[in-house]
Image (cartoon, grey):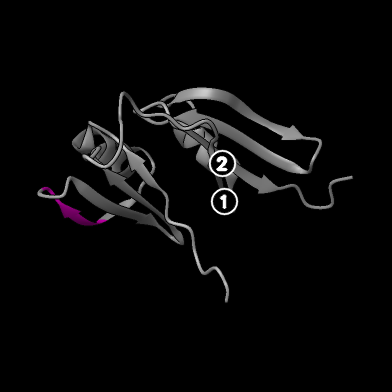
Amino acid sequence: MKFEELRPILRTEELDETIDFYTKMLDFTCDERNDDWGWASLHRDAVVIMLAKPNAHEGFAKPAFTGSFYISINDVDAFWEKLKDRANICYPIENFEWGMREFAIYDNNGYILQFGQDIPDYN
């Protein structure tokens, strides 16, 4: 048995605004949307994120997640230049001692999205 992929589902009361954030700010594509379910599926390259309005099976006060979503990309500097003046920044781009160049932003719900790239030959 093997795990094949992870597709997080982000809960949001603001489905339209969240789809707009991911498609307009981060260039994701909305592949599917079902307003009866309050659900959408988005992708950019190999990254898939689903969005869903809260449902009766869970308690929901506000969007909450105690971690972050880390997305590896191949040109972190270009993506930083695109987002730095448009996004709500969690921390600016920098090199880290673990050999990654990265930055983080908040999406429109407050979820933290980190974007990083390996630093070649980092010592």
Q: Nearer the viewer, residue 51 or 85?
A: 51
Q: Report whether 11 appears left or right of 85.
A: left
Give coordinates of residue 50: x percent, y percent: 33, 50
Give coordinates of residue 34: x percent, y percent: 15, 53
Please report contact status of discs 1 and 2: CB closer than 8 Å, yes or no.
yes
Residue 41 image-quadrant placement: bottom left
Q: Which residue is mark 1?
A: 73
Query: Hey, what amino acid is under mark 1?
Result: Ile
Q: Residue at x 56, y 41 (%)?
A: 115
Q: Which residue is mark 2?
A: 115
Q: Residue at x 52, y 30 (%)?
A: 66
Q: Is residue 52 above or below residue 14?
A: below
| Magenta span of residues | 31-35
Q: Secondary structure at mark 2?
A: strand
The verdict on residue 83 being magenta is no
Q: Is residue 7 above or below residue 15?
A: below
Q: Secondary structure at mark 1?
A: loop
Pick the quarter of the image with the N terminus. Answer: bottom right
Q: Which residue of the protein is positioned furthest toward the left in this rendering?
A: 36
Can you tell which mark lies on residue 56?
Answer: none
